Image (tube, coloured by chain):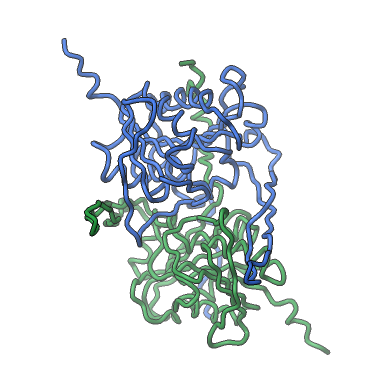
Chain colours: A green, B blue
Amino acid sequence: MPNKSAEKQPLILVCNDDGIDAPGIQALAHAMTDLGEVFVVAPVDEQSAVGHAITVRDPVRARPWPFTGSDKIKAFAVTGTPADCAKLAVNQLLPRHPDLVVSGINRGPNTAVNVIYSGTVSAATEGAILGIDAIAFSLCAWHAEEYDDAARWAQQIARAVLTGGLPPGILLNVNLPDLPYIEVKGIEITRQARSRWEESFVERADPQEQPYYWLSGRFINLDDGEHTDLDAVERGAISITPLRIDLTAHDLLDEFRQWEWDKPT
Amino acid sequence: MPNKSAEKQPLILVCNDDGIDAPGIQALAHAMTDLGEVFVVAPVDEQSAVGHAITVRDPVRARPWPFTGSDKIKAFAVTGTPADCAKLAVNQLLPRHPDLVVSGINRGPNTAVNVIYSGTVSAATEGAILGIDAIAFSLCAWHAEEYDDAARWAQQIARAVLTGGLPPGILLNVNLPDLPYIEVKGIEITRQARSRWEESFVERADPQEQPYYWLSGRFINLDDGEHTDLDAVERGAISITPLRIDLTAHDLLDEFRQWEWDKPT
């Protein structure tokens, strides 16, 4: 009997924000080949801290990219943001609607308030907006040289999501500790820690003696409660935080309805 | 007796994403002068659909801007995103921590899923992250020539927030119908409508016969429930949606804890 299962393989879109030649996306894409057909659609250049930016006033370009190490992976490099990559992939480049969007593996954590600034998370958010199960993966290390252990965990988590399916409007934000596979202290379901940046801008003068400012800052955890993303990775566990694309504070609607809004000026 | 109340006036930061010379920010800043001391810190150029992008790899510049019509308003134009403007203002440009951040008045609605892409909302989100009460204002019209009626409502809403104060981590997203002041059908507290973009990319060839793609699309409301932002403005009311900066799906944490994540591959 001819094997038709190939046609029914899940289609997996792999995005990131560190750029298509980053080691994290290499490891993630290869790990996904065990789970389905893999398309990589990622930015040509690093796009960190772009948040959920999309390109509307300029065109974007996509060109086939020789993704190394596997002829099972098709890849396109895009002149745009992570959210652009997900949009363009789903609407234009992929042969059919994907079953899963994975983004990463990011260089550095995307925990606590940093979720809002993250390009890695935004590609997964765009997947969720487009009605596709989506997961963002970040490795909690700034100078990691290999992502294979993290990718092995990512494969397990992606398999669980392909099996279980996510509720509509929900994506998963996964932060992985920088540990060998067997040293990871399990998987924990967490919430974003309350935190802030103690920011400063370095003020300098350019060669024409005009001032410019450069963002600098120190991250501060304000949350000593249980089950936070920061706490899990600090203890060597993998943090999985389910995120909503609906930002409405539903529990406060009735309270705000009691306010006196209509008093004329 | 000397009047010391001037020292105690609220300090109000005004940002936007349409750029510092847009008519919406002119009207909003002038409306705020009745409520406190006003600083405008806004992008030099239009920054729509930038989401919560921040500039970390490049410097940003700020220069004093001759904001027309009132010597009560101090203004700076910034070479950055709306979130950059809020950060730079609070950390560098303002004489003290502001009491309120208002963003807008945006040209066009920021309802439903578009909240995620909105630069206008992101300046207010940054305010909330920085621990400041914050409101985003958008006028539901693409070609409005005057924003004075909208700004009069914005002043009322800002006054209510200065009086009542917002809970931590909450900002307000306000969408105003394009109607004369007295024809507005009141203020409604709403949730984001479920919606999606039916997107397409226009594919063209450049003069060198290389392909490029341009994002295009049609917005679709998927939500016929009550009390949505889209529904309110369609009926001519002002929509106020409280938004959270914590994206965690708190109500799903226990459910995800039941999943079998740890099965080794």
Q: Please tell me whether residue B145 is drawn above or below residue A40 in the rendered image.
A: above
Image quadrant containing the N terminus of chain B: top left
In the picture as drawn, the residue positioned furthest to the left comes out as B1
Residue A88, how many percent across, how many down? 62, 64
Near-viewer residue (B163 or B25) = B25
Residue A181, how many percent across, how many down? 42, 80
Q: Please tell me whether residue A191 is drawn above or below residue B208 in the rendered image.
A: above
Near-viewer residue (B69 or B240) = B69
| Residue at horizontal 49 percent and vertical 29 percent from the top | A256
In the picture as drawn, the residue positioned furthest to the right comes out as A1
Q: Position of A38 compared to A203: left or right?
A: right
Residue A143, how many percent across, how many down? 33, 75
Q: Position of A166 compared to A105: left or right?
A: right
Q: How many marks overall?
A: 0
Residue B120, how many percent across, how many down? 48, 42
| Residue at horizontal 52 percent and vertical 34 percent from the top | B174
